[in-house]
Amino acid sequence: QVLKSLLYLFFEKDLGLAIATSGLRIAKAIGLSIVVALPLGIAMGAFEVVNRFFNPLVAPMRYLPITAFIPLLIFWLGIEEEQKVAFLFLGTVVYLLPAVVDAIRAVPEELVQTAQTLGASRAQVVRTVLIPAALPQIFDSFRTVNAIAWTYIILAELVNSKTGIGFILHEAEQKAKPAWIFAGILVVGVVGLVTDKVIDGVNRL
């Protein structure tokens, strides 16, 4: 029944378009998270004065229930694409930022001291030692954030979605189609795994 539903959803319900739409929303949100978390996380990990200023503001965010922000985001941004991307952004940036900070701080101190002994400035140490050494661990955190985004996509698309995997699952619930739900869950798992392998491949490069 699940396999038959999968074929039906692909050919009759534009499941391919739904996957592409959800993937685009996730890509936008993760892109925004990287733009915010990467420079801020590097600065917090490399410079203690920056960390002291931002850490009291950032640390509690990891413990906030992100789903509670949905009504606020609807109030501020409406019910269109901006609200969905913003929700996914909030859900991913709170995990990515501390991961970047931890990756920078995990760089062996002897590498930093060697660079400083050779006359490197603090900015040169960040650019030529900390970032290259932390990059593999940072890319691993991208994989975690990708997994988080695919778990949040269902919630993000519950509000006024016209397409997307979350929309299809919501329709399946309304029409009491458990086979559709299993098919949707299967698709999310497979797509999440494929994107994880792509990020891992880029990390290896």
Image (cartoon, rainbow, N blue to C red):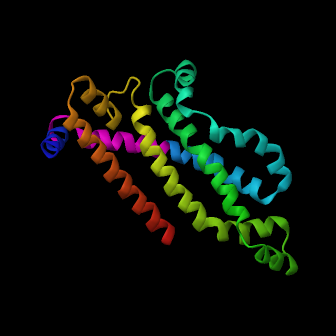
Pick whichever, 185 or 33, lies toward us.
185
On the image, the x and y values in percent for residue 152 come to 45, 39
Query: Residue at position x 42%, y 45% from top?
Result: 150
On the image, the x and y values in percent for residue 4 come to 12, 43
Q: Is residue 106 left or right of residue 151?
A: right
Identify the residue at the far top of this view: 75
Q: What stretch is highlighted in magenta?
A: 11-28
Query: Residue at position x 45%, y 50% from top?
Result: 147
Figure check: 8 above or below 201 = above
Q: Is residue 140 left or right of residue 41?
A: left
Query: Residue at position x 47%, y 66% from top?
Result: 202
Viewer can see residue 119: no
Query: Residue at position x 59%, y 64% from top?
Result: 137
The N terminus: image quadrant: top left
Number of numbered discs visible in the structure rendering: 0
Figure check: 200 above or below 116 = above
Q: Does the magenta stretch include residue 107?
A: no
Q: Quadrant of residue 182?
A: top left
